[in-house]
Amino acid sequence: MSFLISVLLAVLCAVLLWALLTKLFTLLTCGHADLTRRVDDKIVVITGGNAGIGFETALDLCKRGACVVIACRDVKRGEKAERDIRKAVSNAKVNFMPLDLFSFKSIERFVSAFASRYAKVDILINNAGIMQNDKLELTGDMMEQTLQANYFSPFYLTKLMIPLLEKSQQGRIINVGSMLYLAGKVNVSKLADLQNDISGKNPDVYSDSKLLLAMWTRQLARRLTGTGITANYVHPGLVKTKLVNSNSIIWNLFIWLAAKSPYQGAQTSIHLAIHPTGLSVSGGYFQDCWNLPWIRARDQAQNLELWNETERIIADRIAERS
């Protein structure tokens, strides 16, 4: 028995040491956006800006003088985020507007309402995302929730916002993804079947959605060449948000010890929103404020095929609604 206890203690110590070393590595390598740069009166839309990385991004940009629109589904949380920012930043220019990424109709209403209030958008940050690999459900548009929220809806929202981004003349699109895109598996020819599959046979749907987001970002950047609009992909790192909550005590302990804070996780999104790099680079993969090489999503033909198939699927869903 004493031997078993000794082994368990040794394993626990090893896990704690690993977590602490990971935490130290995170602190040493975590990128930091330039604290001196201002973005006065730039109009910024942040999906999921009510909590976590999105809220920290919204708060930081408001401190820099931006006019921030928090776009999220939960009205109470959105309004609370707006109040919290106004309390933290005197004369903050921040507004909540409802946006449900489970609904293409909601996206259309959001863009229409936004265009009636603002003449342009300078920065669009597709930050919102969900992870529910163990509970696959369909949205009202008859799409698997994770794929619609993490990929199809950002695609459609961005498409509708392009005319407003063009009016900026220096528009920036920042897609918050994940390094887990490396684990994604995508067969474009079967995308129509994947997006409405809730059989539970696809436990890696989150990784798949982030690979789709990466492939789309690459093709989007190519299509925007010459327009003055850039599009880049961000891996924020492992961040302590609701996205990584678990019932596992060991996992939660690891997250508490090793993960970034939401403020730290927001730094790369902020960097791309405020720094000249966000305008000089398009189609990039950014982590800890560094532009790193793409490992996947480099097949231009496949990215184009995905774009065309995505447009067809969304058009079909909207036509079915009508």
Image: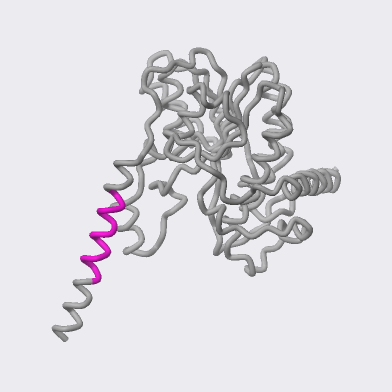
Residue 192, by quadrant, is bottom right
Is 268 in front, or is 77?
Answer: 268
Is 294 in front, or is 272?
Answer: 294
Residue reaching furthest bottom? 1
Query: Residue sitting at 53 percent across and 38 percent down?
Result: 48
**Residue 287 shown left or right of residue 315 in the figure:** left
Q: Position of residue 88 (x, y in %)?
A: 36, 23
Instruction: State the quadrant of the N terminus.
Output: bottom left
**Magenta highlight range:** 11-23
Residue 119, by quadrant, is top right
Q: Is residue 15 magenta?
A: yes
Main secondary structure found in the magenta portion: helix
Is 265 in front, or is 139?
Answer: 265
Q: Position of residue 55 (x, y in %)?
A: 45, 33
Q: Position of residue 233 (x, y in %)?
A: 56, 39
Q: Is residue 9 above or below residue 259?
A: below
Query: Residue sitting at 68 percent across and 24 percent down?
Result: 113
Kindly tell me whether residue 49 is visible in this rendering: yes
Instruction: State the quadrant of the C terminus.
Output: top right
Kindly tell me whether residue 72 is visible in this rendering: no
**Residue 95 shown left or right of residue 141 in the figure:** left
